[in-house]
Amino acid sequence: MTFHLNSQADLESAIHALVKQDPRLKPVFELAGMPALRRREPGYAGLAAIVCGQQLSTASAAAIWARLTAAFDPFHHDTLRRVRADRLGRLGLSAAKIKTLKSLAREIAAERLNLDVLANEDADAAHNTLTSLHGIGPWTADVYLLFCLGHGDAWPAGDLAVQEAIKIGLGLKSRPTAKEMAPLAEPWRPLRGAAAHLWWTYYRAIKRREGVIGGTEKANAVSNNVAVAKRSSAKAKITATKPPRSKK
């Protein structure tokens, strides 16, 4: 049975369970404090918003998304499936993102893709379903599962902030790779998504202690680390099509 992070109470319950089952997380929790639940809109609109933000700054992504949602209200997959690509381009979308949004719209319209049912699937299977879609990389898939669906076991193995936090929190000699992150997270199943929230909060706490994060930076820490991860994920996908830090 899949655990869902639908409320702050759900997250807090999961964090307490994690700390109890893995004593190594106790000092991590003591420094980080209780994470705050973050949720986004699910469905096509939620995934489209993440796609629009790939490889862009938070401000640029927000501006493009605002133009899109103003132009297409309500924002529906059938509308995006039919609209001309050049109109989407004038709103600020790249050719690659237009292709991804239209491909997703076609998959949903043809009932080959149901984004909502992924919330109840095994996290790894749901991740693989998403990354099999055109233009959806590991970062995008993990962000959708975690923040749009509240999947309690989704695990952002490629997120650089989570990797660095685990390196410090578990006393590792080097930052684990995405491949090495999978076995490290095994003790936290089926609550790896909650563990990710804890590690992100721990990372911010470390940076605050080092004087790196303060004021606006504190509020945008996760977004900044995610932006770096997006670039790494995008490069990995480009390499994969020729022979994934934290988005579909």
Image: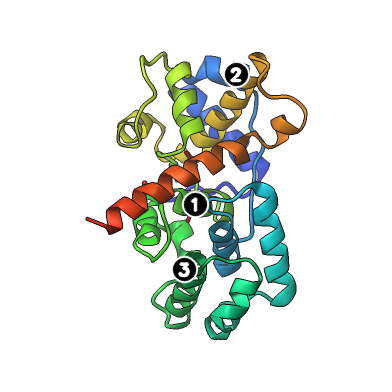
Residue ID at (60%, 75%): 88
Identity, as a three-letter code, of the amino acid under mark 3: Thr
CA distance for labels 2 and 3: 36 Å
Distance from the alpha carbon under mark 3 to that under mark 1: 12 Å
The tag earlier along the polypeptide, 1 or 2, is: 2
Q: Relative to residue 101, is residue 20 depicted above or below? A: above
Is residue 73 in view? Answer: no
Q: Mark 1, residues whose alpha carbon is within 10 Å: few (<14), some, or many (≥20)?
A: many
What residue is pinned by disc 2? 206
Q: Residues within 10 Å of mark 2 (few under 14, many from 20)?
A: some
Per the image, the residue denoted by label 3 is: 100
Q: Residue flagged by tag 1: what amino acid is it?
A: Lys
Q: In front of the other: label 2 or label 3?
A: 3
Whether label 2 touches label 3, CB < 8 Å = no
Circle 3 residues within 10 Å: few <14, some 14–19, many ≥20? some
Question: Regarding mark 1 in the picture, which secondary structure is present there?
Answer: loop
Which residue is labeled 1 in the image?
247
Q: Amino acid at mark 2?
A: Ile
